[in-house]
Amino acid sequence: MTASLLAISGLTKAYPGAVANDDVSFDIGRGEVHALLGENGAGKSTLVKMIYGLVKPDSGTMTLHGAPYAPAEPRAARACGVAMVFQHFSLFDALSVAENIALGMETPPPMGDLARRIRAVSETYGLPLDPDRVVGDLSAGERQRVEILRCLLQDPRLLIMDEPTSVLTPQEVEILFSTLRKLTAEGVAILYISHKLEEIRALCDRATILRQGRNVGTCLPAETTAREMAQMMVGTAITPPTRAARPLGDVALEVTGLSLHSPSPFGTALKDIRFSLRSGEIIGIGGVAGNGQDELLAALSGELRSPSDAIRLHGTPIGRLRPDARRRLGLLAAPEERLGHAAAPDMSLTENAFLTGAGREGLVTRGFIRWPETEGFARRIIARFDVRTPGPGTAARALSGGNLQKFVIGREVLQRPEVLIVNQPTWGVDAAAAAAIRQALLDLAAEGAAILCISQDLDELMEIADRFGALNEGRLSEIRPTAQLGLDQIGLMMGGAHDMEVAHV
Amino acid sequence: MDLSSINPVLLLASLIAASTPILLAAIGELVVERAGVLNLGVEGMMITGAICGFAIAVNTGSPFAGFVMAALGGAALSLLFAALTQIALANHVASGLALTLFGLGLSSLLGQGYVGIKPPPTPKLDIPLLSDIPILGPVLFSHDLMVYLALALVAAVWGMLKYTRAGLILRAVGENHDAAHALGYKVVRVRVLAIAFGGACAGLGGAYLSLVRVPQWTEGMTAGVGWIALALVVFASWKAGRVLLGAWLFGGVSVLQLNLQAAGVAVPVEYLSMSPYLVTILVLVIMSADKSRAPGSLGRIFHASQ
């Protein structure tokens, strides 16, 4: 951690209409884990893309090993020892592990040698992986190992990691962290981007905080609280969601023996799901992505039909009802995928407001759309949830992820649901917007609505949920009060027997 | 009806020749689709190749020059498609359909002076000794050069996709173009090259029809072979070996039904003429019932900023 490995000075990059990075400077030392913090749109991605050679800076300089560094393309960056693990995995599903790794290398050895090296390196760093397996069949944690191995085989001096833990179980996070510590002990520097402040406090030596494209400060995460870091990111104080003690009402939603096949070939079948949700209560459902979350949401919202008695709303069997019929009865849902599932990307916010609100908000008379009322509804969502947009005529696609998420959740909350199902309500949303969404859910529960929140963010579930259950391979664990749960128990609930495999294969 | 007039050796020999146009077009389209591009203009590129090759062969007297020009003509037309879909980011399906319609029109314009003319004959390779072997000789070793070129192309494409780095990059681009771009591969360049290769192959296939199979020029003479080549690629699950099988099947049934027509089988001619299309699709549908799937980025528009 003595000499500086990469020094960045005055990097600026402007896109039409927005400055992504404005005069950003910082440096990273050998063997240092350096965190890059910031809200969505603060310019973190653009900054690392410039370091990795995917984007050319407008002005500013970088030096690597004391020599000027200006990679024209990722190939040049890799040749200089800069490697990157992407947030959205840059893997090819139909290709094998070895082929995927070969694609990330400049001069890959013949496949046989490569397979041997993959085995060797993966064992050295505790990341077991079979080079012949097809990537499409791997779990999220294993896919990330492929990405990391791809970088490690090139002896990187600087490893850039963009949100590496967002898809991992707590146990997998531990494995990743011990791998990263091994690397730093060998002198590799790591530039670590994450939203999860507690992780940064546990792992990182220094943190640089970006706000609206500017470097607004550096701190030592170990000596700074998560709260202080969040405030530096946002620039104002964040009020953490407050939860008032709520009286629980009658059982609003009851699910018994719900078993369903997934409609998609890579999906997970639901196996004998049972729980009951009371008015005023929030149940959090955790679990690693792809363990039946999407199917559970689809079964509850009505996109997938199930046996009539398997799902009851206030005692009425609704298993065979379609989504619009369920909406009329008071069961609303907001799916995970914002663009394409929760909202139609190329339609305006007004039209999107109509799509789920038509029935409950009375936006149709005799088959004709009541546009003034529909626009009024959209404006109410925008005002109440602080959606930053030029107006309700804007296409959903044009909104940033966080703003669209506020709109999508707000649209359901304002329809006064009796039962609300949400999947990943704050996925990819910055701290301030996430706090606002969580507060809205808590307020809704306080007004007597029953809420089922499916999420991969455990902190979020601990913050808002009264009871917690986990999905594993389509099975739902026992649902327990959150107040009594520790992280270890949650990890076991999420992984079942599988976390043992992750640790020892 | 006299089935004994059908000679099985001649049948097998003409099967191989009859399958060559569709094989050439399909192997080109296979490379295009493995790179993630859906070019529905195969029919248009084939018929453009057919007339380009025919015109040059008639004017120069050299079928070889004709084939070269056919490949260039098909490639040139496919570059129009490349410009539309890779640079102007137009929809693949609409651009491909437009390419077919444009190719059909362009070819009848170019071919106005060539109706009813005989092209120079394409010489057959008579390999001494080998072609004298009974049965095997006439079936395998008495064709023209293009037949062997087509077979060599299939083998080369199979080997390239499976064993070479270039093939791996091509598959990667077709599987996930965003990831390939993030790794620094030139998605647009790879795709333009693949499209041009597909165009050249389709052009060669068309010229084989007008110079060897028929051999003369008539408007619309490809008669849907380009579409069958497209279907062949899909039902062959994007695998070169299965494309070869499908093409032989199509060629075999085509030749057989012609022989049956000549032998006077008591089935209406219309049923016989549709039989190659039906049988090929049916067999390939059954074969493609395994879990192999289309390249992940097939037909999706790539834009580097995303």
Image (cartoon, coloured by chain):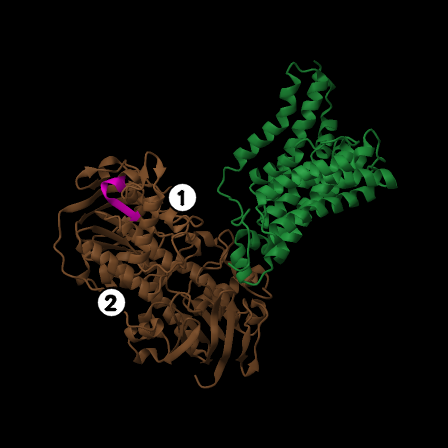
Chain colours: A brown, B green
Q: Is residue A464 above or below residue B5?
A: below
Q: Position of residue A263 (x, y in %)?
A: 38, 41
| The quarter of the displayed image where residue A163 is located | bottom left
Disc number at residue B79?
none
Choose between A322 and A390: the one closer to the eye. Answer: A390
Q: Which residues lie in the magenta part?
A: A326-333
Choose between A405 and A226: the one closer to the eye. Answer: A405
| The quarter of the displayed image where residue A410 is located | bottom left
Which residue is the site of mark 1? A264
Q: Is residue A207 above or below residue B16?
A: below
Q: Position of residue A78 (x, y in %)?
A: 55, 70
Does residue B128 appear in this view? no
> Measuring 43% from the left and 50% from the top, which residue is drawn there?
A345
| The quarter of the displayed image where residue A386 is located | bottom left
Q: Residues within 10 Å of mark 2 (few under 14, many from 20)?
A: some
From the image, which quarter does the C terminus of chain A lie in?
Answer: bottom left
Numbered disc in front, either 1 or 2:
2
Which residue is the site of mark 2? A240
Q: Residues within 10 Å of mark 1 (few under 14, many from 20)?
A: few
**SS of the residue under disc 2:** loop
